[in-house]
Image: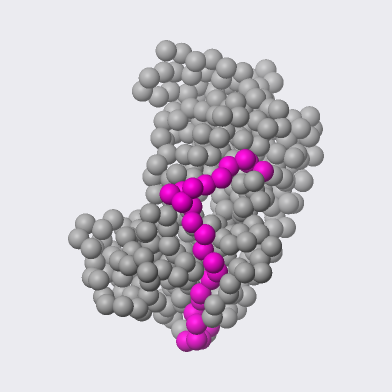
Amino acid sequence: MTLRNIFDIAIIGGGLCGSTTAVLLQKAGYATAVIEKTALGFFKQGESLSPQCKSFFHVLGVSFDSTEAIEYYGIDSTWGSNEANSSSFIFNAYGNGLAVDRDKLEKKLIGEAAKNGAVVRLSSEIKEILYSNGSWEIKTENKKEIGYLRAKLIVIATGRNSFQRLNRCSHAYHDSLMALTMVIGHPSRSLIKNFLTISAADNGWLYSNHLPGNRMILSFFTDSDMVPNARPRLKHLFEQAHPAHGGPDPGVPEGQKLFVSNARTSWTEVQSGSFWVRAGDSAYTIDPLSGQGILKNFEMTHFLVEHIRSFLDNHQKIHQDYFSYNHHHFMAYLSEQKKVYQLEQRWAKNPFWDRRSLSW
C-alpha cells in the first residue's frame, strides 16, 4: 500500500513535544503530519510536571483520570545541609504538580493530534528527504506501507535523539549527567506523602516521586564516568534511595529493570534553516534538577506555533527571533543551574561536585 499526502507542516517525532506541536498547529488551521519511528510505549524520563503545565493541557483540551496522572503537593529537599526542607504548592496559582504515566500521556497526546485532524504515522522510518520545487519531499516506510508526503515546513521534535538528516549539527554539552532509574510498586499506600523528593549525595543526587497505579519512581543522577556497571547499578540506586525513604531495606527486587538515560545539558548550535526548525529537546536540553524540562518544551512550542506563519512567509526573520528566544532562556537557565549546584558544599572536593564548582 502506498500513501500520498500534501501538508503545510511535517513533524518528525511523535513524542510529547511533537504531538503537542501537532495539536496546536491543527487548531491554528494548518494541515499537519506526524512521523514517528517507534510505536511509542517505551520508558522516558520526565514524569513530574510543574503546576504551570496544567494551563497548557487546558489549551490542548486534554484532561486525565487517576490511571494517567496524580497530583503531588510539593517538594521535599535535602540540599546544602542535613536539614530537610519542605515546599508546598498550596499557594501556587496553578495548584499542585502532576505526576504522570509518561507512556499514557504521550499516547493520549498523539491521539489528540489525530482527533484534531493530524495524519499520524507511527513505526515509520524516513527513507528519503529532500527540498524540491518549494516544498519538502519525504518518503516513509513501515511494515505495511510506503508513504510519500510533501510539506512546506519541517519541525524536528526528536528529543535527545537529534535528527541529523537535514543538518549535521554539533552540540555543546555542559556536563555528562546520567540518570539511573527504576519504577517500583510502593509497599504501602498509607505511607505515601505525595511529595517529590530531592536529596544530594556524595557524588550525585537522588530523586523520587509517586506515580499513578501505586508506583514510585527512583532515580539517581551522576556523571557518566561514575555510573557503576551492570547489576551493581541496581544495588547502588537502592543504597541511595533507602536513606531518603526510611523503613526496612527491601533489598533489590529480583529481575527489577534498570533504565539508564542521558540527562546532559546541551545546546544545539544550529536550530533552524531554510524551512526547517528544531523544537523541544532537539533544540536544547536542561538538567532534570530544574524540574522545568516539560514546561520549557511547552513554552517553546507555543512560541514556535505563534510564529509559524511568519516562518513560512519570511523564514529569515524567524531564524533570529527563534534563536534569540531560545538563547535567552538557555543562558538564564545556566545561571540558575550554577547557583543551585553551588549551594551544596558538603562534598565540594568530590568529583561530581568539584566539576560544578565556581570554575564550572
Magenta segment includes 83: yes
Q: Is residue 270 visible?
A: no
User: Could you tell whether 92 is left or right of 221 in the image?
Assistant: right
User: Could you tell whether 28 is left or right of 222 in the image?
Assistant: right
Q: Position of residue 253 (x, y in %)?
A: 23, 63
Q: Position of residue 250 (x, y in %)?
A: 25, 71
Residues drawn in magenta: 59-84
Q: Position of residue 269 (x, y in %)?
A: 62, 50
User: Could you tell whether 241 is left or right of 19 in the image?
Assistant: left
Q: Nearer the viewer, residue 209 or 143?
A: 209
The residue located at (54%, 15%) in the rendering is: 4
User: Does residue 340 lie above or below 11 as drawn?
Assistant: below
User: Does residue 57 lie above or below 285 as drawn?
Assistant: above
Magenta segment includes 119: no
Q: Quadrant of the C terminus?
A: bottom right
Q: Quadrant of residue 94?
A: bottom right
Q: Quadrant of the N terminus?
A: top left
Q: Which of the colour schemes (rainbow, by chain, secondary structure, one colour) is used?
A: one colour
Q: Residue furthest top?
A: 1
The residue located at (43%, 45%) in the rendering is: 103
Q: Nearer the viewer, residue 75 or 204?
A: 75
The residue located at (58%, 79%) in the rendering is: 342
The residue located at (49%, 15%) in the rendering is: 3
Q: How many numbered marks, from 0 up?
A: 0
Q: Is residue 277 visible?
A: yes
Q: Residue furthest left?
A: 254
Q: Quadrant of residue 178?
A: bottom left
User: Does residue 146 lie above or below 74 as drawn?
Assistant: above
